[in-house]
Image: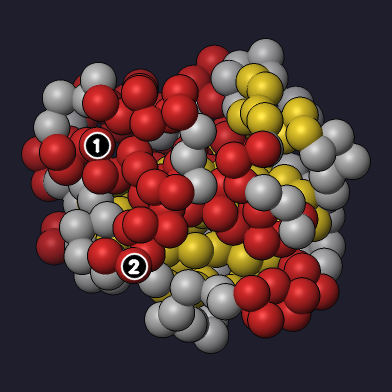
């Protein structure tokens, strides 16, 4: 996956817009270490209401993560759509998935995820999309959680991994499942036992869907976001290349 270390300048926007129809874009931000220039760009793109919301967050780390996540989303959508980031307006679907109200003829789908300072944004041209990023936490791997969210097939595959690989395998599956239910728009209302994913690194990323979901429509990819994190993206339509861009 090609990577870029730079925030897009105005001359790159046209290229980005053309390329989005031929690929799916993911942008990865480390809110703990991004430059002051990028931080300023993010903050300037936010609305007054979003600034006010950020002030209600309890910690400076949470506030910074929020500013980067929502500011970068607005800034990048503005770049793709040649629109003022502060004029974009959003609505919420049935299960709280955000979508653009203005501009109303937008052909870009987007999704957002963040975890412990890392922010992941995904964009595709007119198709459904879901992304998820999670930081490894070995204490999260409990029998109760596994039985609640993993299918028997997934638990069997996880148990087949070497003990030192199971935390990574757990989060590999978790992010793939989370990205899928975000792409479908179901979110936390979804029955996580109604589908399964591969999690063994020797197998290609894939979804095992029941009759509840249309077959042949969903594309699953894992993303290389660093040694302490797992991330995944799911989108509909053609299985286009996925480009990860770091800022």
Residue at horizontal 72 percent and vertical 46 percent from the top? 109
> In this view of the protein, which residue sits in the foreground, 43 or 217?
43
The x and y percentages for residue 146 are 30, 31
Residue at horizontal 29 percent and vertical 44 percent from the top? 65
Left or right: where 150 falls relative to 161: right
Q: Secondary structure at mark 1?
A: helix
Q: Secondary structure at mark 2?
A: helix
Name the residue tied to disc 2. 37
Residue at horizontal 35 percent and vertical 57 percent from the top? 40
Left or right: where 135 falls relative to 44: left
Above or below — where is 247 with respect to 79?
Answer: below
Above or below — where is 20 with respect to 149?
Answer: below
Count of numbered circles in the view: 2
Query: How busy is the neighbourhood of tag 2: few (under 14 within 10 Å), some, or many (20 plus)?
Result: few
Report the coloring of the rendering. Answer: secondary structure
Query: How busy is the neighbourhood of tag 1: few (under 14 within 10 Å), some, or many (20 plus)?
Result: some
N-terminal of the pair, mark 1 or mark 2, is 2
Name the residue tied to disc 1. 63
Residue at horizontal 89 percent and vertical 41 percent from the top? 105
Q: Residue 124 is drawn in which quadrant?
A: bottom right
The x and y percentages for residue 44 are 44, 49
Separation of residues labelled 1 and 2 (CA atoms) = 17 Å
Q: Quadrant of the C terminus?
A: bottom left
């Amino acid at each position: 996956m090609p990577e870029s270390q730079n925030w897009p300048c105005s001359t790159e926007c046209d290229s980005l817009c053309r390329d989005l129809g031929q690929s799916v874009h993911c942008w990865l931000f480390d809110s703990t270490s991004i430059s002051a220039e990028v931080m300023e760009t993010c903050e300037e793109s936010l609305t007054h209401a979003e600034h006010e919301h950020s002030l209600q967050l309890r910690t400076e780390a949470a506030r910074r993560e929020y500013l980067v996540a929502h500011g970068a989303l607005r800034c990048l959508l503005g770049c793709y759509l040649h629109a003022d980031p502060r004029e974009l307006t959003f609505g919420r679907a049935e299960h709280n998935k955000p979508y653009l109200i203005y501009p109303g003829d937008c052909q870009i789908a987007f999704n957002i995820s963040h975890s412990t300072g890392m922010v992941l944004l995904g964009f595709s041209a007119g198709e459904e999309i879901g992304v998820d990023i999670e930081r490894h936490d070995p204490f999260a791997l409990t029998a109760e959680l596994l039985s609640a969210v993993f299918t028997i097939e997934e638990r069997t595959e996880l148990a087949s991994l070497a003990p030192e690989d199971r935390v990574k395998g757990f989060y590999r599956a978790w992010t793939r499942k989370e990205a899928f239910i975000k792409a479908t728009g179901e979110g936390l209302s979804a029955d996580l036992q109604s589908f399964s994913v591969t999690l063994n690194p020797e197998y290609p990323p894939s979804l095992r869907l029941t009759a509840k979901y249309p077959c042949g429509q969903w594309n699953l990819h894992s993303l290389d976001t660093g040694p302490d994190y797992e991330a995944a993206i799911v989108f509909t339509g053609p299985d286009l290349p996925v480009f990860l861009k770091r800022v």
